[in-house]
Image (tube, grey):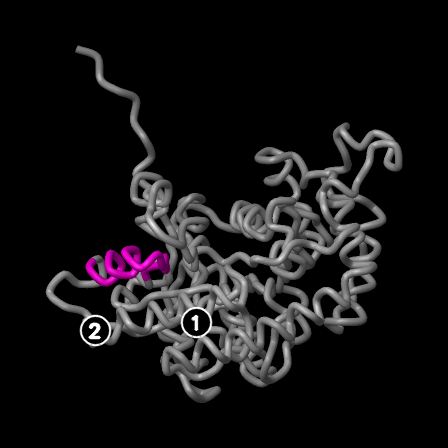
Amino acid sequence: MSSEPAIASETRSMPGAIYSPFADRLVGHPGPLFPLHVGDTWRDPFIGARSEDIHAADHPRLHAYGNTRGLPELIDRIVEKLRARNGLEHASEEILVTAGATGGLATLAGAVLSPGDEMLILAPFWPLIRGIAQGFRARPVEVPFHDRVATLEEAVRAVESRLSSRSRVLYVSTPSNPTGRVLPGSWLEALADLARRANLWIFSDEVYEDYVYEGEHVSIARFAPERTVSVYSFSKSHAMAGQRVGYLAGPERVVSEARKIGTHIYYHAPIVGQHTALVAMNEGAPWVEAARTEYRETGARVAEILGLPAPEGGTFLFLDVASRLDDRGLDGLLEDCFAEGVLVAPGGSCGTDYAEWIRLCFTATPPGDMLEAARRLSNVIRRV
């Protein structure tokens, strides 16, 4: 009898349904639905930055293959933005336009990680980063951080305690997904110094840089440009998730290797999306300002309903619900939320220490609907 071909053990260990175990049950659900489990926005891109606004008559060869690094005019604009906004000096060869920030981080992982290498990940974290490390046969090492450390010294010790001879990458996210925490510049400088001493690459996830409500966004690359690759996303900045466009900025020697990985996986970021991204960079400031004002107000109001501090940045709230669980555990709470039409992400997707937490995205539905979802969630939590 013939046997079936094998599947990689690393792939089998990766979860398929990251954000909600109920996503496949949405069709036919009675009553309104509040899908707060995925980090998206209810807002549309502004007119001019939508896919339908880009026409082949205005862009010769729009449907042909393009440069695997990205549209030259978009790269030039990114260089200008990084200098003016982030205080970073980059040549065009140090920029790579990618198929979203997810694609960008995957190409980076493929460029620098060998099987058995370790990626230190400040936890709780963006759910997909763990799987990206596993997909390239590396070991994700979770560093309890955002909800655990209160001082610069504690921050450094937390990372130092997880270092090993196989450590290769430190993944930093600020503003944090899922906690909304904005790391101060002094902490980032200390983490950069640690990375230099340990000879680590730094993957700096800055996709929520436009949505800071308290404090100031600082790019860690200012302190260690020789080992930092900064990652950005038009999905988050301009509500363009479907266009699949992000970009990397870092030393040419690693960006060029990431480009090789991207070429062999998705070839290049979608051309139409790159054109809309250029429009977004040139004309999108008023849209971003309006979105930031709305997100700040909505996040604060939802946090108040749930009895949490207002988020410092980003689009998420992260709740410890351990004391609210009955003998059914978190699955029971998620089932009760689903019965009310509210989908939230299980906290375990953000780290193994967070199996009794939940994450919600407060920009996923219009503000009025979001407040109703928060009230329903609050009622579920309180009656358990």
Q: Where 142 sits versus 116, above or below?
A: below
| Looking at the image, residue 193 lies above or below residue 258 | below
The residue pinned by badge 2 equals 383
Gap in Å between the C-alphas at discs 1 and 2? 20 Å
The residue depicted at 60 percent of the width and 84 percent of the height is 215
Q: Which residues are magenta?
A: 332-346
Kindly state the secondary structure of the residue where label 1 is placed. Answer: strand
Determine whether 121 is above or below 73 in the image.
below
Q: Is residue 343 magenta?
A: yes
What residue is disc 1 on? 317
Residue extending furthest toward the front: 31
Determine if the magenta segment contains residue 156: no
Instruction: Measuring from the top left, give residue 290's x and y in whole percent.
Output: 69, 70
Label 2 element class: helix
Which comes before the other along the chain, label 1 or label 2? 1
What percent of the width, then of the height, locates residue 284? 77, 61
Q: Residue at position x 82%, y 57% from top? A: 77
Give the amino acid type for the residue marked by disc 2 in the picture.
Arg
